Image (tube, rainbow, N blue to C red):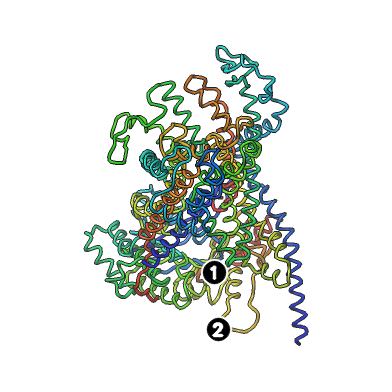
Amino acid sequence: MLIFLARRLFQAVLVMLAVAFIAFALFNYVGDPIDSMVGQDTSLADRQQLRQELGLNDSFVVQFARFVGHAARGEFGLSYQQQRPVAQIILERMPATLELSFVSAALALALGVPMGIYTGLHRGSWLSQGLLGLSLVGVSLPTFLIGILLILVFSVDLKWLPSFGRGSVVHFGWWTSGLVTRDGWRAIIMPSVTLALFQMTLIMRLVRAEMIEVLRTDYIKFARARGLSNRAINFGHALKNTLVPVITVAGLQLGSIIAFAIITETVFQWPGMGLMFIQAVSSVDIPVMAAYLMLVGFFFVIINLVVDLLYHVIDPRLRIDREQVGIG
Amino acid sequence: MTGPVLRVENLRVQLPNRRGILTAIDNVSFAIEPGEVLGIVGESGAGKSLTGAAIIGLLEPPLRVAGGRISLAGRRIDNLPDGAMRRIRGREISAIFQDPLTSLNPLYTVGRQLVETIRTHLDLPPAAARERALSLLREVGIAGGDQRIDHYPHQFSGGMRQRIVIALAIAANPRLIIADEPTTALDVSIQAQIIALLKRLSRDHGTAIMLITHDMGVIAETAHRVAVMYAGRIVEIGKVREIVGNPRHPYTRGLMGSIPRIGGARGRLRQVEGAMPRLNEIPPGCPFNPRCPEAFDGCRQRRPELMPTGSGSAACWLYDKSAASMAAVADG
Amino acid sequence: MSSTLVCGSIASRWALADLASSAGAQRWHLALHRVFDSDLWWSFRRSPVTVGAAVISLVMVAAALLAGWIAPHDPFDPASLNLLDATNPPAWLPGGSWRFPLGTDDQGRDILSAILYGSRLSLGIGFAAVLLAMALGVTLGLLAGWRGGLVDTIIMRIADVKLSFPAILIALLIDGVARAMVPHDAQTEIASLVVIAAIVLSSWVQYARTVRASAMVERDKEYIQAARMIGVRPVRIVVGHLLPNAIGPVLVVATINLALAILTEATLSFLGVGLPPTQPSLGTLIRNGNDYLLSGDWWISIFPGVALAVLILSINLLGDWLRDALNPKLR
């Protein structure tokens, strides 16, 4: 078990380094950092000196090491656009994205899993067919379109919900939360539904497919032959076996919520990291792009690690036990 | 108990599909006495497993019972509602399947699966159920039950898993066990042990066993009587000794002739030409007639029912020459 | 005695080789035949939803291809635009006219024509991206599956890492990098190429994995080993035998990915980092119209949105049907 953990950690570090490498390459070689820092009329000599001071003439390895060192400490340099430390910008925007992601994930799970179970168990029913049809629509509609439609109906027509922004937020130390105010909640409803819809349909289809597979297995057939009640079979055996692989895949999917947040934040002008990233891409603000990349890479690696460990803990077949295997 | 444990009369199982209705089991009848081991033997696709599934009520739709009746100890069971059938499963009729690797839920301990089955059928508190589980494990020959009961299925070998499967099947002391290829997935040495176990259990508890297999050797070892199936019908049925020593139906003769025997006469193994017809290509008359070395006109026209042949019955016109020749005369 | 043995074994090797090479041609025949098997057509005809989806897809593809001829206006010819026509509502609402059936945008461009041209771009980019991703993924997959060993490990590691990041992110990254590296004026010209590249690089893994799995299964079969023994060139084996077996699942992946590609391109364009307003795809049109949503001119973004949704939906339906029809387990 420990060996497994060590190996996964090692892999995680490798992946992070790879991501850091890409971010660094972005940082240093795409566009000229000097150009974006100084004005047009700075003399060549001054530029050279600046180059030297910033250590841009050092070897690749040294620069990379320095980059990684800085990144580990949370220093990502200054944003070209805003001339402020990138770390500060990120800290400001992170709570918005995290809250949105969290609420969406909760929504997607809370609705997706039960719907998946129901459509898996009652395959022919009306409701199942309806839900499946809707899920197909959910998967086909681009996230931004859903957002636009929601805005059209609830903001423009009905005027119930705000179409942009976070509403009023409360500060807790460096964290800002919109979940403690009433219009914070009003503001988060549409974006989180938009973000959750895609995930929800994915989870529902996943749970359904897995459930159908499990219900076909020999051990379910044998459980039926033993006369176990439908409840025991469906919720005791089938459900547990369904959720085990689903947990892992769903976990990975939830990681992608953070990426899809980019789109949702753009539609609703939600002041989070996603919107920050898009603005950085449009204005070629390299430090911000690089920092976002590293951060998201970090999140993904952590999520993957946790999911792997979770799977290991849940599935007894993967636990290495020192007991002797019985002789037949 | 008087009377057979299981009586199957004129069972017909059909499969409607887009091209029409296929008959997978056609007019099958037999009975099993208490404590008897009846072997059902035949090639893959002959309908053996489907018969077992129909009896225990686990036919997968669109397969369905389209005719006949199935009675358990005199009580009709083929038309029972779901709930009633479920109470019979495991309690009065049990089934075990071919692959012990996949028959057990990998995520639950053996003990939990045993206790769950026990408590479903017998009204026992958890502690007593666990005791019974332990004694079941002992009975099927798993040593060290106290510890192993809390192990997971993957921690057992194939043979042991099949023993656990059997333990689960006898947990509520059923009258009949339907064993569908119980030894096919196991090593030959383990096969012998499992067969011995089944025989012992049958003797000790008076459980009848319907032993479905394609392996005639297993039947010869274990069964009292045997039914030979072909294309969804029983073509011969009788005592094992008779069928093995002196098969009557040409198909059975072909089967026996194709089995190599130690110490038997040397020479080429006989082979039956052709292959069993698919469900949508069953010829009129006797389904075996295209491949039968002794077929004559009557065989192609009318389908033979089971006819007495001395000690058993065979569905073959050879044993009812008078009726066949009358049919031939009538058709001119 | 030994010479007969040798002759016998050579003869059987030739026989195997012959079998392998004619089997190769046969395999392609079989593969294509399987696709158009009666079973497939039967289930196709039986499902009205699928037939409907296919019809819609075909109609849209045809309309997009013929955009140049059937569009009532050319929305991108500045000379034909009249600002007085700007922000007309659709024809059935007050203020609209049948000259502009679905209304006009802020510049007086006809929405219907814009949708037709935009669909053409969206479809074109989608198809191109899928074909290229398929080429890349299938090649890498075959390579990994056939060679195994280090090559396999490297390719699969890259694939694994890539898979843990969602496609959008990768597409955005590539897009961003391209932007940074290419001078501003050239950007609009190569915008479609950049988008295609972004989609290709973010979606090749699916193909690679599918093909690799199938290749590995086939590779160990005896007729392949026989072919290798007598020296049939690896390329021939790979293309002649491994590839046809993988075609089925690859086609299914491709159909799903087509919808995804169109969706990704639309998203990138909506976010402002895809196709520019001078060459708008459906996504760009929606982006453009978004600004007018709050002021009540909803048609500028909703109609392109509906067109996009219908397109993706019908392709998804086709993909679903294809997957079910080719899946032996569900038959």
The chain identifier of the residue carrying mark 1 reads B
Is residue B57 in sight in this rendering?
A: no
Please tell me how many numbered marks the rendered image carries.
2
Relative height, residue B56 to residue C102 (above, below) = below
* Quarter of the figure with the N terminus of chain A: bottom left
Q: Nearer the viewer, mark 1 or mark 2?
A: 2
Q: Residue furthest bottom?
A: C1
- Seen at 43% across and 38% down, the residue is A195
Residue closer to the observer: B25 or B71: B25
State the SS at label 1: loop
C51 left or right, relative to B154: right
Q: Is residue C188 left or right of residue B233?
A: right
Q: Position of residue B206 (x, y in %)?
A: 34, 69
Amino acid type at mark 2: Ile
Both marks 1 and 2 on one chain:
yes
Q: What element does badge 2 sit on?
A: loop
Residue B11 x, y percent position in the rendering: 49, 55
What residue does disc 1 label? B309
What residue sits 50% from the left and 32% below the top?
A145
Instruction: Please tell me whether residue A156 is drawn above or below residue A319 in the rendered image.
Output: above
Classed neighbour count for the residue bearing mark 2: other residues with Cα under 10 Å, few (<14), some (14–19), many (≥20)? few
Note whether residue A9 is visible. yes
Give the amino acid at mark 1: Thr
In the picture, the disc for residue B262 is: 2
Find residue A21 and report its horizontal and vertical position in percent. 50, 55
